[in-house]
Amino acid sequence: MQEADIQFLENSFKKYYFDHFDQIKVPERTSEREFGYQKFNSGMTRHLAIKDDKELHLMLIQNIPSDVYCSNAYYTFPNLPMNEKDWKEADLIFDIDAKDLNLPCRESHTVSICNECNEVSKNSSQCSKCNSTKLEKKSLPCNSCINASKIEVTKLSEVLIDDLAVEKENIHVYFSGNEGFHVYVYDSQFQEIGSRERSELTDYISFRGIIPESFGMKKIKPNRASFPDFEDKGWKGRFSKYAFGSKSKRSKIITELLANGYPSFQKTLDDASESIGVKIDPNVTMDIHRIFRLPGSVNSKSGLTKIQCNNLEKFDPYTEASFLSDDTVEVVTNCPIEFRLKNKKFGPYSNEKITVPTFAAAYMICKKLARIA
Amino acid sequence: MLELGQDEIAKYPFLADAGQYLKDQGFSLEQFGSDPDLKQLIEKAYERIRVAADGKIYKSDLDGDHVSKEAALPREVFSFLLAIVLLKLSGMHTLIKRFALAEARRAEKYLEKDLANISDESKNQLAIRVIDDLFSVQVEKLDDFFVIPVSNYLKHSINFHEREWKLINRHVENGQVYLSPHETVRLIRKELGTYINSKIVNARTPTMIPGFEDSVNKLVLLSKKFVTYTVTTGEYPPCIKHAIEVLEKGENLPHSGRFMLATFLLSKGQSVQQIAPLFKNAPDYNERVTLYQLNHLAGTSGAGTQYSCPSCEKLKTQDLCFATSECDNIINPLQFGRKKK
């Protein structure tokens, strides 16, 4: 990124932080958390301890970070090196990202930026100008990406509440500021479990690693009575709905499953995880030392803010999470995909010099599809 | 600590304070070495270890009815305590491990029986308390099942590699896992073994007691049987081959895949300089970053922690596993191709 672009983003972010202090609050048990931040074109500064909102605001204004992070873990000494921090517990966190959902719309709104010559194209395997294969992909998520992610969040909440006895009030959903949602679970029985246990929990939630025996099928002398039913709790009930469709079809489908045999049933289960399993990123949930984007901070991949969604169904990130100013600015842009922000449509642009509001300019510059003119 | 009756100590002798028990019964170790009647108990203790070393569970006198219970109970405890003395005197760690495991499985049998005992509530409660006190697993009885909190279950189930123990293959409801008495006890097998093992390891080693020498020498001979040699074929496991192929094609290998590849090769003794060129074709290759990260993994920079290669289970979760039949029975890619000679 060139100097003028960085200058522009820093000014826009600074203004946001200054005008929206009310939106940026430290999380509970602040002094036990590790904080960190990144500046444009620079590495990560982490292992910071912050005491309260005031100290956080001061850090933001002094450093104007591109991204701000905070741990889900609680430590005795959050500012010491990792192995001296004394890990105590960590909130359970899930990352649901549209890029992991294999959506058919994705190709239509993904562009490749060549690392060698900066050419922007929709060709995903090599640069259309210099044939280099070193490409950086950027996606401008569409409404169906957001809707599909919301469905995953709803599925996740259902498993957390029904199977794992998490209280509804303790589940907080945040728009990540780019392509998905972060789901935080507070005060659950899982606060103190380690990384391997969390990895097992993600397999449960994603409906992975199942053996046929658990869902009624046996290698020798399988028996109709052991197959799950609609009223069963947890995954058995959900799998019944998926596999049988309706109560009247259950008997017939069980006959088919028995006829097709054990290996085929394993395949049925594996296919089921693709459609009924919750699509969470397992690496995020099992990392108990990670620092996560701080709610209320701006995401430098988009210029949008990570904010809590109180009404997930109605939530529209492109109107509710865009907080940068309306002041206009002139940019040169090569953005082949149309996008919508604050109820205004932008693009597509093909190597044009245009004047747009700051929030739209920042969005394109963050995606590396524009530069300050 | 739990209050134990005589027959409970016989079933769970590792719960007793050994020194105190001998004193309470009015015996000293020296007497066992010299008194001809007591000396046969040393032979019994040796047998108990030998059976364990063979991977079998010692057949207890408690199970038969050919001896009176009063006589059998203390002999049962003595043979356990003397076995520990013999093991300490022999100093053979492989035997201690095998003995602890076999004793754990023996205790498991009794725990399971006690848990399932519906006619005697006190037996039932004792088993539940042993499990809670020793392993902090809060078991509750619910109809025909024993239920434990999911978080509790996970702490133990992660030690198993069989898929049936995965949470997804369990009956989960309302934050609890439903188990049979057998499964409840099986869940803590490893911890029970570890507990007994640590009790033996931490026990004081006495000086040689006259009359114990023969059995100790026999143990030293016995342990020689278990020395094994392993050889490796040197071939890379399929997950590693796959990762190298992806990189060679210039395709993107996710961070977790790079982590696996680097930690694997480092563990196989390759240097950072040897590994770094593998990443040259990656779409986002940056020499400085690659070297920094490799040095970090090797423990030559940063906090000095040397990272180890992830387990097969973890790689499965990360979609990095491409197991073939040659991967059977391994739990970490580093074990691939290792054969016992």
Image: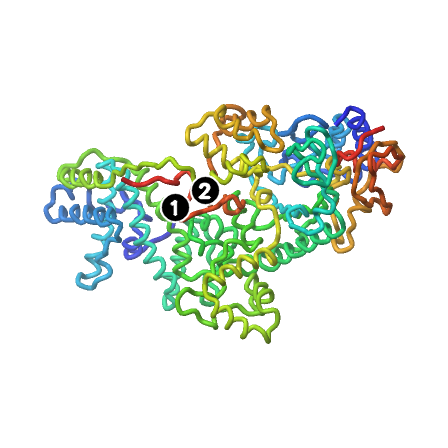
The answer to the question of whether label 1 and label 2 lie on touching residues, with beta carbons closer than 8 A, is yes
Question: In the displayed structure, does residue B321 sit left or right of residue B86?
Answer: right
> As shown in the figure, which amino acid type bears the numbered disc 2?
Pro
Q: Residue sitting at 37 percent across and 68 percent down? A: B119
Question: In the displayed structure, does residue A21 sit left or right of residue B145?
Answer: right
| Residue B209, image quadrant | top left
Q: Residue sitting at 49 percent across and 23 percent down? A: B273
Q: Position of residue A322 (x, y in %)?
A: 81, 42
Classify mark 1: residues with Cα within 10 Å, few (<14), some (14-19) or many (20+). few
Closer to the camera, B32 or A320?
A: A320
Q: Position of residue A264 (x, y in %)?
A: 49, 62
Closer to the camera, A236 or B181?
A: A236
Question: Which residue position is annotated with label 2?
Answer: B238
Q: How is the image coloured?
A: rainbow
| Residue A93, image quadrant | top right
**Residue A55, above or below B61:** above
> As shown in the figure, which amino acid type bears the numbered disc 1?
Glu
Classify mark 2: residues with Cα within 10 Å, few (<14), some (14-19) or many (20+). some
Q: Residues at marks 1 and 2, common chain?
A: yes
Q: Chain of mark 1?
A: B
Task: Identify the mark nearer the N-term, 1 or 2.
Answer: 2
Question: Which residue position is annotated with label 1?
Answer: B326
Helix, strand or loop for disc 1:
helix
Q: Residue sitting at 66 percent across and 54 percent down? A: A152
Q: Is residue B24 visible?
A: no
Q: Is residue B286 visible?
A: yes
Q: Position of residue B92 (x, y in %)?
A: 25, 37
